Image (cartoon, rainbow, N blue to C red):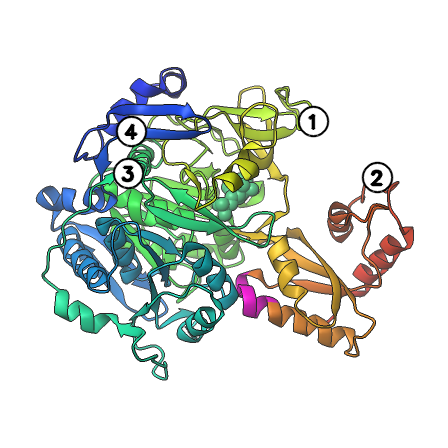
Amino acid sequence: MRYEDVYRRSIEDPESFWAEQAEAIHWHVRPRAILEYDDPPFRRWFAGGLTNLCYNAVDRHLDARGDQLALVAVSSETGVTREISYRELHREVNAFAAVLRALGVGKGDRVVIYMPNMAEAVFAMLACARIGAVHSVVFGGFAAHNLALRIDDARPSLLIAADAGMRGGKVIPYKPLVDEALAASKHPPAHVLIVDRGLDPRRSVVEGRDVDYATLRERHLGEDVAIEWLESNEPSYLLYTSGTTGKPKGVQRDVGGHAVAMALSMRTVYDVGPGQVMFSTSDVGWAVGHSYNVYGPLIAGATSILYEGLPTNPDPGVWWSLVEKYRVRTMFSSPTGIRVLKKQDPEFLKKHDLSSLKWLFLAGEPLDEPTAQWITEGIGKPVIDNYWQTETGWPVLTLLPGLDLKPIRFGSPGLPNLGYRLRVINEASGEDAKPNEKGVLVIVPPLPPGCMTTVWNDDRRFLASYFGHFRDLLYSSLDWAVRDDDGYTFILGRTDDVINVAGHRLGTREIEEAVATHPGVAEAAVVGVHDELKGQVPIVFATLKQSNTETADDVARGMLKRVVDQLGGVARPARVYVVNALPKTRSGKLLRRSLQALAENRDPGDLSTLDDPGALEEIRGKLARGPDGAG
Ligand code: AMP
């Protein structure tokens, strides 16, 4: 089948297209309508249909593939590998669901999951899905403040946490972060369920609140927990992501649309079917982890490899050794992951038998041409750039080797995915940009199945954040883009203050707020600047209060500590520059883009509105002399 024909049908005849795709999953009650769209941009895919993500991911496969591996959880940190068949997964998920029930969790309740890439994180997610609870996985690299913000927004009835994570052989206890987050939150859950790997023997226990998973599992193992059938548009999970304000947005996903989008993309994009193996190196705390470590491969009846650890431990061939051992067909990683390997001996790419591997997908940040070239030649397999967002939950721009692979063009994530009606719009006029002309990438609603349904508890924010940018009702991706004559789209970076660090999305506002909690800081501006390895890194420019008595170096170190304590190591600024003034317009608007340009050695642009031209000169000098608080 030709991509062009299938794509055209998905756009011109969406209801018949999606009705056909819906056949790929199990419905307890079939939808009464494929699409209800009487309150744009809100839409209801598969309205009235009853289904369940856990049933589709686990129970449905028991007869045909009960003994096949469903999940392989490999940790190069603890040295433990767990190979779990669909039958074992069913047993573990039921036990976990029974524990959730025993703790009083029911349909619609929120459950925060704060765990690294370990099998129980997957059991916990599927157990929530089984009983209709709404999970909100918080990335284990986030610190207490970030966790507290998410708890207060979601108001969970339970928090599930690991005792600790590990990174590069170092144990990172989670429990102190959980205690701190709960102390700071206005709506702490009644219970904290701890999954103990014995990594933190000194872990504290809060009597009456903290419960031990292993003890409860023992009690409930062997129980069968009935599936809670959900209407297709009910929430399945929340995943918080950064925006332009300091408050993260709870991206809300549906049930039926998500299941159908997963089934379709596993087949047409990732080319993985029942019995085949997919290895995504993502963390379960990100959108890729949700879609292509958990729901996608399991709904497809495939085997999913989950990896905890660095790509270089025990050696830089560790990922490829897993490809060889488990006969991985499709691998999914990030450009940063590959750039890490690029700094190592290329011989590690040659040491393992990669004959099973057909495709390497890379997503989450721009894929630079040298990296794409290096890895394509290194493994001798097609490398496919994938563009999507937490909000969409599955690729927006991609090539579709499972359907009809079009030529790869380095630097471009390719063509519109099935069901996505895309335009590139001139920011000012709202008209379509011409080929090769820069504009904003937008999705013409209704958004396809699987994309976010709203911002948790905040329809107005959903409308204002995504649909309020143009005259017409359009979903703004908040990314600049350009389309070439053949329809290949190139992504040119964000239109807002979101930056992308090693594929992780960070709001500069969040970092500014953390920095500004330092008593010596008067004002701070955070911008993302180019970095060879991570794509972008945050750097801070700050002015100090008159009353401050500390040295600039001490304040800079204090600022770094506050960011790490409040937001986690992922958000740690690469450099801090203490200056006398920040560049502002006469009306007081901070010129972030000029700051960013200066820091990247580029032309700072039109400075006619600048209030104090001396500020830029000072910053130039400061950048040349070096940061504060280094070393
Ligand atoms: P996240 O929601 O964390 O996945 O971040 C989504 C953002 O990452 C997008 O809005 C883009 O700015 C960026 N992004 C994701 N994938 C790509 C890609 N393949 N090429 C360029 N930018 C990307």
Q: Quadrant of the rendered structure where residue 321 is?
A: bottom left
Label 3: few (<14), some or many (≥20) within 10 Å? many
Give the number of the mark in front: 4 or 3: 4
- Mark 4 and mark 2 lie on one chain; the one further toward the N terminus is 4
Q: CA distance from mark 4 to mark 1?
A: 36 Å
Q: Which residues are magenta?
A: 563-570
Q: Is residue 560 left or right of residue 227?
A: right
Label 3 beta carbon within 8 A of ligand 1: no
Q: CA distance from mark 4 to mark 2?
A: 50 Å
x and y percent of residue 531 in the render? 63, 53
- Mark 3 and mark 1 lie on one chain; the one further toward the N terminus is 3
Dominant SS in magenta = helix
Q: Secondary structure at mark 2?
A: loop
Report if residue 206 lies within the magenta region.
no
**Residue 46, label in figure:** 4
- Mark 2 and mark 1 lie on one chain; the one further toward the N terminus is 1
x and y percent of residue 66 in the render? 11, 49
- Mark 2 and mark 3 lie on one chain; the one further toward the N terminus is 3
Q: Are marks 4 and 1 in contact (CB under 8 Å)?
A: no
User: With respect to residue 505, does 566 lie above or below?
Assistant: below
Q: CA distance from mark 4 to mark 3?
A: 24 Å
In the foreground, 181 or 556: 181
x and y percent of residue 463 in the render? 52, 36
**Residue 272, label in figure:** 3
Amino acid of disc 2: Asp
User: Is residue 367 among what the camera can see?
Assistant: no
Amino acid of disc 1: Ala
Q: Which residue is mark 2?
A: 606
- Mark 4 and mark 1 lie on one chain; the one further toward the N terminus is 4
